[in-house]
Image: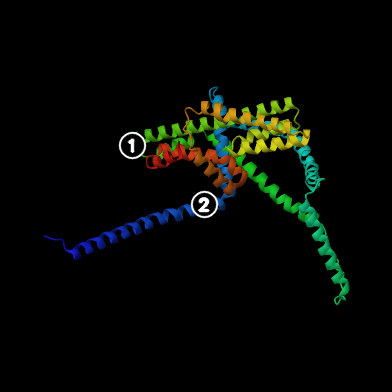
Amino acid sequence: MEPDPDNNSSFGTEQKGRSVAAHAINFRSIAPIVIACLGFIVFLDWAQAVLLPLVAGIMISYALDPLVSLFDRISMPRPISAAIVLSGLVAVLVLAAIPLQTQTMKMVERIPDAVRQFERESAAKPQSEGMMEKAQEAAKEIEESASKSEEKSQPSRVQATAVRVVDEPFSIREYLLDRASGAIIMVAQLFSVLFLVYFVLATGKLYKRKVVRLSGPGFHGMRRAARMLNEFHAQMRRFIFVMLLGAVFVGVVTWLSFIAMGVEQSLLWGVIAGVASAIPYLGPLLVFLGAGAAAFIQFGSLDMAILVSGVSLVITSIQGNLLTPWLTSRVSSLNPVVIFIGLLFWGWLWGPVGLILATPILMMTKTLCDHVKNLQGLGELLGK
């Protein structure tokens, strides 16, 4: 019995219609997710003034929590221990800011001299010129002389009118108001971060107990929530500790190495290298280029610039390839591609502070996804 061609054509049309319908259904299911992601990005940009201090305060509280926990062993009230630790941190930052300010001013004062030196060297013409360059200059001179002779032969019909350009007077009041507004916003955000860190450290495990109670009345549900929060808290503490230890290692070793090589503003370079170590890939590259340029300006020697840049590269390589992997053996690691994309995204969204907070935010997201059953697929995607 031969197959009916009409039935075959109808069957093919039906299959094609089903595939088109399935494609439309998939598109309809993905479209709300895409719209929600775009709306979330817009919200992050719009609420930057609130979210940035909030995230920074949470990260700092994770870094200071081990110190506050040490005072818990001697039965000191947690609000008092949090105040002591936070006051000590502020005192250290203020004392370190005094020499750093002096070295920063010296470095800034040298920038115009370096720019002028670069302009003089770039503007200097070589002594020997090729035949093509001489021919081009001769043709240019002939063209200019011909244009001048034509201008002299034609009478000028339009008389030139002198125009006097008057600059607007400098307003000290407007200058101070513009500067003061930015300074007030920065100081307000700094105080908001400090207060947030204090309250998070002072309350301790209060919010963790509340989350456990909200997880449900059952004992097994509360136990599972408590275990998840403990693992999340411990993993974030380890990660922040590794970041701080790596930054201290890079900063101190860079400072001592630059002192040994006679590099000026070595303390400032140590601080810059320590802070930049929190930015994977981009931070060490910026220190490598900046230290080499500063050494070339100071010593005027390419060999010395290569030596200083090489030392900074060796220090960051030890921190990135030996120290950090050894310390993060018990901490879940991130995918390098995800880290780089996160740096681009958070740097574009929140600027330099976003670059520093990008890796901790990604680590917090991955740790949360690893402990939530419905998000474990996303956690696997973020990890190695």
Quadrant where the image shows the N terminus: bottom left
Whether residue 116 is visible here, answered yes or no, is yes
Counting from the top left corner in percent of width and height, residue 213 is at: 40, 38
Counting from the top left corner in percent of width and height, residue 260 is at: 73, 24
Residue 100: give its label: none
Could you tell me if the residues under marks 1 and 2 are in contact, i.e. CB atoms within 8 Å? no
Q: CA distance from mark 1 to mark 2?
A: 37 Å
Counting from the top left corner in percent of width and height, residue 383 is at: 45, 37
Counting from the top left corner in percent of width and height, residue 360 is at: 53, 38
Quadrant where the image shows the C terminus: top left
- Left or right: 340 as drawn, with respect to 33: right
Question: For the residue labelled by badge 1, is the local secondary structure a helix, a strand or a loop?
Answer: loop
Where on the picture, by quarter, is residue 299? top right
Quick one: which residue is furthest to the front in this view? 131
Say if 230 sits above or below 130 in the image: above
Where on the picture, by quarter, is residue 138? bottom right
Question: For the residue labelled by badge 2, is the local secondary structure a helix, a strand or a loop?
Answer: helix
The crowd level at tag 1 (other Cα within 10 Å; few <14, some 14-19, many 20+) is few
Residue under the image location 79 percent in, 48 percent down: 129
Q: Amino acid at mark 1?
A: Gly
Q: Is residue 143 or residue 183 the one in the foreground?
A: 143
Residue 41: give its label: 2
Q: Is residue 51 or residue 8 the one in the foreground?
A: 8
Give the residue at mark 1.
218
Residue under the image location 70 percent in, 35 percent down: 292
